[in-house]
Image (cartoon, rainbow, N blue to C red):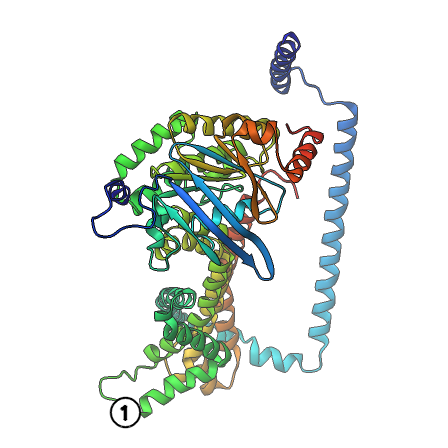
Amino acid sequence: MTVAQTDSGREGADGEGGMAGADDAYTPSQRRIERERHKRARARRATAIAALSTLVTAAVLYLVVVDAPGWPRTKETFFSAQYAREAFPKVLDGLWLNIRLLFVCGAAVLVLGMLIAIARTLRGPVFFPLRVLAAAYTDFFRGLPLIINLMIVVLGVPALRLQGVTVDPVLLGGTALTLTYAAYVAEVFRAGIESVHPSQRAAARSLGLTNRQALRYVVLPQAVRRQVPPLLNDLVSLQKDTGLVSIGGAIDAVRAADIIVGRSLNYTPYIVAGLLFVALTIPMTRFTDWVTARMDRQRAQGGIL
Amino acid sequence: MSEILQKSGAPEPGTPRESAGDTSVLRMESVRKTFGGSVVLRDVDLEVAPHTVTALIGASGSGKSTLLRCANLLEEIDDGAIWLDGEEITDPRTDQDAVRRRIGVVFQAYNLFPHMTVLENITLAPRRVHGVPRAEAEEHARGLLERLGLGARAAEYPDRLSGGQQQRVAIARAVAVRPRLLLLDEITAALDPELVGEVLNVVRDLKNDGMTMVLATHEMGFARDVADQVCFLDGGVVLERGTADEVFGDPQQERTRRFLRRIVDAGRL
């Protein structure tokens, strides 16, 4: 009894002493100063090496390209300042269509993908046809090349001359994009649903939640949260693939560039359109990285590695 | 809740029930459960009276957890039958969700919902399954947390809590729906030794409140202290059963003696 009391008493005092020491009365030891000096020196050396190797790489690339026999001709047809100035406003106009397509198709893809994923995880004999249909859908549209899907929908549907069905290449192109991407996103959601440990479902069921309630309140929220990085990745991919609706004649950034190229036989507008797509994608990619890093950090709280 | 009220009424005349006069909360008869080729429960009989605590002891793999999972219909049994309050729940026509609503489970690994706060974890089933209004469910949950010494933790997420605190939240979640029977599956096995006590104290409190419980445990000292009935599982059957004093003090079976000797040698009793 006495021993225990003394023990706990000393422990309390230690705790206080440790905390107070962190605030005042602490001078770094010689060992720590030496260690930090060494780390700084190492960091300086690393920066210098990185700068030098970047310089060398850039110089080599420049010389290889500029020394190439076809460079003057290539420079003229791909990097003409005059055509770039002419193409820029038109391509930018077209890009607005790509951005709108991204938002509308993105939303449709998320909803449709989620529905398909849920259909694939439904149990019970009633849902058998739904399960099969959903599985067939993902198999088909993940295998079908997007460009062929687009041609079938954008060129094939108007050829049917159906009453009341749109022939607008933008709407049809958006539909084709949605069909393909929903299949990918459905698989992402399904992987998320299956990654939630069965014990979570068991805990939910043991509380009396029905299968549906367990899915809605316990499994799906965790699945979606976990799949945010791969979902954003698919949205980045969708963003650039909106350029493919140009094959139906919709005037997006690619088609706008195409028109100028067809007239002038100078390919600079393609470069302009390409750079604009890259510029559009970069913020999204960085955002994806940031979200992923944040989630990783949350998972590995407290560790330095 | 309504199911319990129905069951407490007298059996309807003209429908003699096999279990008429059966006052036990849980009864198992000749339960058999296999996984693939291996027989986990061979022929288990068990009877749990109201307001009593039954401790299941036995080596790892002796079927303690499986028995609990069968009682909650998380596993389907191969043969035999299980009754809850005199109603056969292994009848394929039983509404399994309704049965689970009357049985609370606390798992070894807590199984709290990581995307919900402590309060949301506890109020999920009362609100979504039993239709309790949010304010009322939260008030009840806060009362429970207060009793468990976790009053200040209601808004935290589970990963911010220690193992002992998480397990106490899991117990609060299980009892928030006022279950008829509480199943505790090695609830201290994943805890650091210094956190075991706080969880076991909660179980003692529940016993004093009259909660009917079945617990699978490796904490022999605790089982001896709290259990009204101790069952030693071995080879898929209840090899020995009796009061804590009988089983621990004067085991009749050689295998029980050998098991308890190993526990004593390990310094766990």
Q: Which residue is mark 1?
A: A161
In the image as oriented, which residue stretches furthest toward the left?
B13
Q: Nearer the viewer, residue B42 or B64?
A: B42
Depicted A141 relative to depicted B71: above or below: below
User: Circle 1 sits in a helix, a strand or a loop, which is it?
Assistant: loop
Q: Taking B126 as reference, is B117 left or right?
A: right
Whole-percent x, y for residue A12 in the image: 60, 14
Whole-percent x, y for residue B151 in the image: 40, 27
Camera sees residue B156: no
Q: Residue at x 75, y 38 (%)?
A: A39
Camera sees residue A78: yes
Q: Residue at x 50, y 77 (%)?
A: A270
Chain to which the residue tagged by mark 1 belongs: A
Q: Taking B222 as reference, is B116 left or right?
A: left
Depicted A102 relative to depicted B82: above or below: below
Depicted B238 relative to depicted A115: above or below: above
Quadrant location, the N terminus of chain A: top right
Q: Nearer the viewer, residue B182 or A49?
A: B182
Whole-percent x, y for residue B34 in the image: 55, 57
In the image as oriented, which residue stretches furthest toward the top?
A2
Q: Nearer the viewer, residue B204 or A14?
A: B204
Identify which amino acid the numbered label 1 is placed on: Arg
Q: Residue at x 59, y 35 (%)?
A: B218
